[in-house]
Image (cartoon, rainbow, N blue to C red):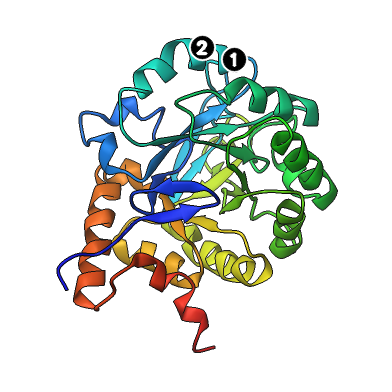
Amino acid sequence: MSKVSLAVNVGGLKLKNPVLTASGTFGFGLELLPYLELNQLGGVVVKGTTLQPRQGNPPPRLVETPAGLLNAIGLQNPGADYFLAEILPELRRHQTNFIVNISGNTVEEYGILAAKLSVPGVAALEVNISCPNVKAGGMVFGTDPALVAQVTRQVKSNTHLPVIVKLSPNVTDITAIARAAAESGADALSLINTLLGMAIDIYKRKPVLGSVTGGLSGPAVKPVAVRMVWQVAQAVKIPIIGMGGIVTVEDALEFILAGATAVAVGTGNFLNPRATIEIIQGLEKYCLDNGIADISELVGAAHISC
């Protein structure tokens, strides 16, 4: 065998390969052009976008941990109108899928954003109901199945694009949240967002982050993320984009074998700006070495022997 198909379909979103960038870790994609060609990626999930510009949380907003990163950016972004006028025209020059991560303060705002951003050049919407670093909306939406359903239906009724709902790990039962999104029309799910955490400066005797708490990402959260992808893959029939601590091709394969149709690299981009490209190459080599003609054959394959 000399050729492998890495193409996948995530709820109507056709990807040339299953490797995406995770929102908030790759800017709008243009910032990483010195390191890679965006055309090589399955897609780019751009920075979280809100209806109005946001300044974000007070500094400090980042803390490095022994195996990850604690952040409290607070969805700093220039707002949907600036994105449409200044950034999207630049993105349209590239041949990959641009997925816009949207976040609202109210259910209605999600619908307004969905309608406003359903334009040529945007391939899909990722609905952020799981950010732990904002006071209004954010994780609150993602911890209540009824609110998850409301937001999902609101977005679906205001767009023709595939709708991907991003889930929070900060819940008791991730499968209940996943089912609420799926039954309300989500085309796909992405998980996990960051785990709520904090750090304390022992010399100043106060929290390090300006907003006290933040979201933990990176290799430390990978076992939690793989477990949740595994559980959700058995609970719903829609595709999953798995993320949480993916740095190497071996990490990506764990998520795919657990049930993810595609994967997204987040904190790994800070360690290695070319991590996504190396993972794509690694997936192709793994398939060739193991006689796998189509990457889709591996999705959920670890469930077979259980």
Q: Is residue 61 visible?
A: yes
Q: Earlier in the sequence, mark 2 or mark 1?
A: 1
Whole-percent x, y for residue 115 in the image: 66, 24
Q: Residue furthest right?
A: 146
Contact between marks 2 and 1 (CB within 8 A): the answer is yes
> Does 4 sit left or right of 297 as displayed?
left
Q: Residue at x 39, y 41 (%)?
A: 43
| Residue in the foreground of this view, choosing between 76 and 3 | 3
Which amino acid, mark 2?
Tyr
| Residue in the foreground of this view, choosing between 106 and 121 | 121
Which amino acid, mark 1?
Pro
The label on residue 82 is 2
> Does 210 sit left or right of 151 as displayed?
left
Q: Residues within 10 Å of mark 2 (few under 14, many from 20)?
A: some
Q: Residue at x 60, y 18 (%)?
A: 54
| Residue in the foreground of this view, choosing between 56 and 240 | 240
